[in-house]
Image (cartoon, helix red, strand yellow):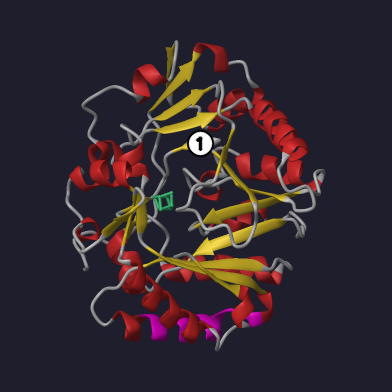
Amino acid sequence: MTDLSRLSNSFLPDFSHIYVEEGAKDFPMAKDILKRLPNAEVIPVQDYKSVFNRSGQDFQAQKKSMKLILALKKDGFLYKATDVVQDAGFQNFYYTTPMLNCLYNCRYCFLQGMYPSANLVVFVNDSDFFDAARRELDSRAVKDEPLLLSISYSTDLLAFENIVPWTRKWIDFCKTNPDLMLEIRTKSALFSAIDDVRPVDNIILAWTLSPNIIANAYEWDAPPLARRLKAVKEAIAKGWKVRLCLDPVIPIPDWEHVYAEFIQMISKEIPAEGIRDITVGTFRMGRDFFKRARKRLPPSDVYYQDYEDRDGVISLPKNESAAIAEKIKGQLTDIIDENKISIWN
Ligand code: SF4
């Protein structure tokens, strides 16, 4: 299941053009972003959807020259997490979308099936997001548990931190809201963008790690494994306890051996006491997103396996996915306690 036609590299688009919604241009975050990109041509638009939702866009062609769109989020600030997202035991689990789309281009990413465009939308009305989070905190169903909020669900927020300091804003908000638990999931090597922040118990920095062969084949444009590991070690050295996400585990030929070596390497590189927990999951995607993502060119073998449709979620057959996860879990117990490993199935 490998596609080595394109090796990953690290890059930041030049953002030659920035579309700015009329109503967004005076927001401090919009002004700050425009100041960071002084050479970009600014194109005013009434509504970001007129650019983002146009029909007939070529997702992969746009990926080669992503444009930035600054907009206002009007509604839908927090969403209840769906079954494809791993909750690691939290009952009040939400996600939020301060940005749409990602600098990276993982072949298994649901964003290819979710959005008609690969351009990046940044919502700049941060205080509306925070007001919505406060409301949800007050009305959460299980009051004696925190509200777990994934802030990097439809993007990789930390990867973009040098242009859009959204991660830092959420961290500041979280510090004053102890009932909130933030998960900041990333493949970025950019821990340096927040390395002055003191570790906070209710913030989970989570790195998705994959064996090199999988990162190279499927995680296009994301930092190579060595750089992600370096970022993880930097975070741990600053006192953070990090979450490691082996997700998705992709069963390439000889995967057991590939993952066994990978986990051995993690155990040598990352001090066990710096690992908060580890999540493990196999590929899954909502049915509608899957159908659209599968049509994207170039085709990826990720979309041509023997999957089953479980209540609208496309995934490996349950017993197969469970067997893979159990195998990985067995290998991981050499690193951390079993009760710190959570599995999506
Ligand atoms: S890093 Fe995450 S959000 Fe970004 S392309 Fe990869 S899977 Fe998608």
Report if residue 260 lies within the magenta region.
yes
Residue 8 location in percent, x, y? 32, 59
Residue corresponding to mark 1: 99
Badge 1 marks a residue whose secondary structure is: strand
For the point 59% across and 62% down, which residue is it? 88
Q: Nearer the viewer, residue 317 or 29?
A: 317
Residue 253 location in percent, x, y? 23, 78
**As shown in the figure, which amino acid type bears the numbered disc 1?**
Met
Q: Quadrant of residue 196?
A: bottom right
Instruction: Indicate left or right for 2 with 332 as reference.
Output: left
For the point 75% across and 53% down, which residue is it? 145
Residue 284 location in percent, x, y? 36, 57
Above or below: residue 203 compared with residue 272: above
Residue 220 location in percent, x, y? 32, 56
Instruction: Indicate left or right for 147 with 251 as reference.
Output: right
Question: Which quadrant is home to the N terminus?
Answer: bottom left
Q: Which residues fall within the magenta stretch?
A: 259-272
Report if residue 44 lies within the magenta region.
no
